[in-house]
Image (tube, rainbow, N blue to C red):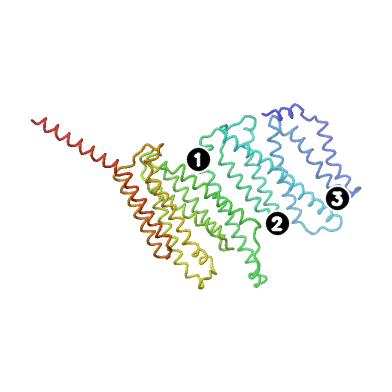
Amino acid sequence: MNPADDAIHAAAPSDGLVLALAVCAAAPLVLVFLVPRRLAWSAFGVLIHPALAVVALRFVGGGDSPSRILFFMSGGAALGWSVLHMVLSRRSGASGVGRTHRECLIAVCRVAGLCWAIVSVLMLTGLSAYRVMAVLGGDPAPNGLIGLWGVVPWVTGGLILAGAAGVRATGDRRIVVGVFLLCVLCASWNALGTPGQAGVGGTGCSLSLLVGLSLVLCVFIGMHGWFRRRSMWMAVRTDPDALLGPIEEWPGFRKAAGAMSVLVVLIVCYELASAGATGDRGWAVLVFVCAGASGVATFSLLGERWSVNLAEVGMGLVTLSVSVLMLSALPSYPRDSASRFPMVFNGLMIGLGLMAGFWVWIGRVWAQQLDGDVAWTTAGRISRLSAGFAFFVALLALVSGSVMAIWPRLRPVGVFDDTLGRMSAAVAGHLWLLLVVLWSGRRTGRTGFDALAFLVGLSLVGFVAVRAGPLASRLHEGSATEARGVAMVEDGGR
């Protein structure tokens, strides 16, 4: 327990203070007919919270940390006021004085729920920042705040339910983006793990974060698509011409979803760089599913409104997913990363080369959706991006092949990567990429692919030149050893 909690426990409220605050909180309800109704309900909304806090500290908290009680109270108050707002908003039929009281209480619920939601979000943000700094600083279980780790999912869940109740009560779709970001926060917090667990701050953390973000992204994009189709159906039932106008959406959701898609791309790249050399096929399949599902979900947003940025992010996620799947076909041995990274580069070169050819092919197929040079469908717009994106993917494949070629020359590596099987696989990967680049240049008519083919040839020559010396030495040593063995056998026979 931290010093602030000790001080609060030392100054525990007495029964008299609890009774006095309860009376003060209930007084506006008694005076509601004597003073202006808005003033009475406002006073009630202000005074009820200190009374609840004191009651929680005095009777509910016991030996629990006051910080935990404050967290639970903030999330619970936001949820309670939001649910009450939803219930009151859906009731009708009141008139006169009853209607005035209901409107005043609705206003109190809206303001109080919003204030407590803001307080909860600020506390969660501060605690999350402290948690990340503790992990980066090498202290995954800092003293004094370890008791708060289990509070965050509950408080975040309460805020998510409060947001859903707020959307139901007010119909304000802007709240959905806040709920989406709260789900992202909850997934990120769960990825950090309980303090002291293995994998905190490592590749296990990043993989858990990837799974959580992909799940949240796909679920919310699916809900967004369902809401949009439902809005279109409700509009066309009353007015068929309503389809010609703008369809109701969730304000700000596309930008938030695009930002999360970019974050998923970065995490997948980190997984490729850090955990690609482990040889775990289950890992590769899981990353493939997360990246592929996120890419398909991002593509689904393009059917509603075109965005070049979302299209490129979706194409990147699909490309990375297939490239990761190629890594699952790599052999399980050797286990050390220095010996496995050349195989990873080889697999990435083949996978990226495959996707470069795929984007060129799909661009040619979807070019039928063009009206001359004008793109009027989503497929037609993607076809105009496909050639440039394919060139970028082929360039990444060339970079992977070039790094694989100079890998033994890097000072910290210390491996030769000069076995006959490895050389055959690397030469086959270069020839495959060369074939894809030449075919793409012929299909698109872009001279950039011709220059890229020349660079692929240079990378192949460099790979053979770097590996030829060690391989020749090993073959020579093997021949000399075999000759000595034959000579010893002959001498023994004599």
Per the rendering, the mark at residue 162 is none
Neighbour class for label 3 at 10 Å: few (<14), some, many (≥20)? some
Give the residue at x 32% y 44%: 467
Which corner quadrant holds the N terminus?
top right
Of circles 3 and 2, the one toward us is 2
Query: Which mark is first along the chain, 2 or 3?
Result: 3
Question: Residue 416 location, x and y as percent?
Answer: 34, 40
Of circles 2 and 1, the one toward us is 1
Give the residue at x 41% y 57%: 452
Tell me: residue 392, above or below residue 41.
below
Q: Secondary structure at mark 1?
A: helix
Question: Residue 302 location, x and y as percent?
Answer: 56, 61
Give the residue at x 62% y 66%: 233
Q: Secondary structure at mark 2?
A: loop
Task: Check disc 2 and give the amino acid type.
Answer: Asp
How far is disc 2 from disc 1 in space, using C-alphas? Answer: 38 Å
In the displayed image of the protein, which residue is found farthest to the right?
34
Neighbour class for label 1 at 10 Å: few (<14), some, many (≥20)? some
Task: Check disc 1 and give the amino acid type.
Answer: Gly
Per the rendering, the mark at residue 204 is 1
* CB under 8 Å between discs 3 and 1: no
Quarter of the view holding residue 476:
top left
Per the rendering, the mark at residue 172 is 2
Viewer-proximal residue, 365 or 59? 365
How far is disc 3 from disc 1 in space, using C-alphas? Answer: 54 Å
Task: Check disc 3 and give the amino acid type.
Answer: Arg
Tell me: residue 23, above or below residue 357.
above
On the image, numbered disc 3 is attached to which residue? 38
Of circles 3 and 1, the one toward us is 1
Tell me: residue 287, above or below residue 373.
above
Query: Which mark is first along the chain, 1 or 2?
Result: 2
